[in-house]
């Protein structure tokens, strides 16, 4: 097999506490050696040399919360287009949500998704299967057979599990497989038909609000159930100061809880809704600045383990409706890394290592996958990042089939340059 020598890059690998400039050799799909001397003689044909001067070499980024929409909503995204968007965003592995049509509650659907991902041959795809049959919240899905088919985690994403007894049994049952439950924390009776965060701005705009408690109450319940069962709960798209405080205190007690935030929640506030632009309609909604600050504080002190995109593509004709009719969600695979760099690293909120651990080793450990590390012998999944590149978010450039981004037209800094999966260059940005 071929070899790749990446020279003069700053390797930042939180899994082994590494941050230094070196030459990294990849051979036969694996991380093979550091500090390899670049021979003066011409490189032989099977060895590729990549000059990474001024670039950051990170373990292949992992996004554990992606909506690929296939099967069922191929007009929004397909497994092929979504995984291409993932590569362009710097991700070598993604976990995809089960709210497809049909939902991923059977071996057949999980196998279908894996098969489509294998055919697309872009990045690694790990299916998240349903907690309940048909995501109806009534009867547990056949979790054992879903694990057998390759499910790495369980969630009824977008449909909060209202039945506490069902959630308790899911947590108990999954102890046997050491798999996490991924919770979409929301109390439907509190969210009602809200379209944005409930607060001063929703009052001014006279738009129905979604109170912070809709997330906070369910976060408290899920943590309580994880605590009593000993099960593993992962809180998806956390957006409120209250939930973050609840998670922080639970971690101090030793509860097996982990949590993620999404780039839009540390980049934007509900002020954006003044535009009435449906590209700012997200669930959970963009909150006030107090909540945004709490997200950043949670990332900094380790309460928040993961940065995940919650990439949620919607075709233009669906999203371009009145605010109250448009679906929730934004595309974010292709802006996620740049927002981390622009909004967290460059202003000095997080250092590179802390930011990258939340996009590499932490999600790998939560999902139980052998990824997120550049240790010798590991799979050669590598993301080469240009930390200084400035670029404008233009939907014409998206690999995603959809363009419902709240950052259209914005100038961001930093992005993936070259993406290597299992020792093969899968993405290279053109000049
Ligand atoms: Zn959700
Ligand atoms: Zn989601």
Image: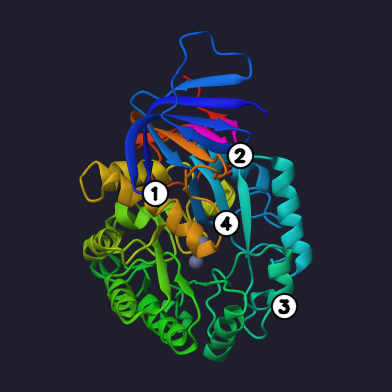
Which of pointers 1 and 4 lies earlier in the amino acid sequence?
Answer: 1
Q: CA distance from mark 3 to mark 4?
A: 19 Å
Question: In the rendered image of this protein, does residue 191 appear above or below residue 409?
Answer: below
Q: Give SS at disc 3.
A: loop
Pointer 2 or 1: first along the chain: 1
Rendering colour mode = rainbow
Magenta residue check for 410: no
| Residue 16 marker | 1
Kindly tell me whether residue 211 is visible in this rendering.
Answer: yes
Looking at the image, which is closer to me, 175 or 276?
175
Can residue 276 be seen from the camera position used here?
Answer: no
Choose between 17 and 422: the one closer to the eye.
17
Q: Which class describes the residues within 10 Å of circle 3: few (<14), some (14-19), or many (20+)?
A: some
Residue annotated with mark 2: 422
* 2 or 4: mark nearer the eye: 2
Query: From the viewer's perspective, is the residue at label 3 or at label 2 nearer?
Result: 2
**Residue 424 is covered by the magenta coloring:** yes
The Cα–Cα distance between marks 2 and 4, rounded to whole angstroms, is 17 Å
The image shows residue 240 at horizontal and vertical percentages of 31, 69
Which of the two marks, 1 or 4, is nearer to us in this view?
A: 1
Q: Which numbered dot is residue 95?
A: 4
At 28% from the left edge and 79% from the top edge, which residue is drawn? 249
What range of the chain is rendered magenta?
A: 418-426
Q: Secondary structure at mark 4?
A: strand
Q: Residues within 10 Å of mark 2 (few under 14, many from 20)?
A: many
Label annotation for residue 142: 3
């Amino acid at each position: 097999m071929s070899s790749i020598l990446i020279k003069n890059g700053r390797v930042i690998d939180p899994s082994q506490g590494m941050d230094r400039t070196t030459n990294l050799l990849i051979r036969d799909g694996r991380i093979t050696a550091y500090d390899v001397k670049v021979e003066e003689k011409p490189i032989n044909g099977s060895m590729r040399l990549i000059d990474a001067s001024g670039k950051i070499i990170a373990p292949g980024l992992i996004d554990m919360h992606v909506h690929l929409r296939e099967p069922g909503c191929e007009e929004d995204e397909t497994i092929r287009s979504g995984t291409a968007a993932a590569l362009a965003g710097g991700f070598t592995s993604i976990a995809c949500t089960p709210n497809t049509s049909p939902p991923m509650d059977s071996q057949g659907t999980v196998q279908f998704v894996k098969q489509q991902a294998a055919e697309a041959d872009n990045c690694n795809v790990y299916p998240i299967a349903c907690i309940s049959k048909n995501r109806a919240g009534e009867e547990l899905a056949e979790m054992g057979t879903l694990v057998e088919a390759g499910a790495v985690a369980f969630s009824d994403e977008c449909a909060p599990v209202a039945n506490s007894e069902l959630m308790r049994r899911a947590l108990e049952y999954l102890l046997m497989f050491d798999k996490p439950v991924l919770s979409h924390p929301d109390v439907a009776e509190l969210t009602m038909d809200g379209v944005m965060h409930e607060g001063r701005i929703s009052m001014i705009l006279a738009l129905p609000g979604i109170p912070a408690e809709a997330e906070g109450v369910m976060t408290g319940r899920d943590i309580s159930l994880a605590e009593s069962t000993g099960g593993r709960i992962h809180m998806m798209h956390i957006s409120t100061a209250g939930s973050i405080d609840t998670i922080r205190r639970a971690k101090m007690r030793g509860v097996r809880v982990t949590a993620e935030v999404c780039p839009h929640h540390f980049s934007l506030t509900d002020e954006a809704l003044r535009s009435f632009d449906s590209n700012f309609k997200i669930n959970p909604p963009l909150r006030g600045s107090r909540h945004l600050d709490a997200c950043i504080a949670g990332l900094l002190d380790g309460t928040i383990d993961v940065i995940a995109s919650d990439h949620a593509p919607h075709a233009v004709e669906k999203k371009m409706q009145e605010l109250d009719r448009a679906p929730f969600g934004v595309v974010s695979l292709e802006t996620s890394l740049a927002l981390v760099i622009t909004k967290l690293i460059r202003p000095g909120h997080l250092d590179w290592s802390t930011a990258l651990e939340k996009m590499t080793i932490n999600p790998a450990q939560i999902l139980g996958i052998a990824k997120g590390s550049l240790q010798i012998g590991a799979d050669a999944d590598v993301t080469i990042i240009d930390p200084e590149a400035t670029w404008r978010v233009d939907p014409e450039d998206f690999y995603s089939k959809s363009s419902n981004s709240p950052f259209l037209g914005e100038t961001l800094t930093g992005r993936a340059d070259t993406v290597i999966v299992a020792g093969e260059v899968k993405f290279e940005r053109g000049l």
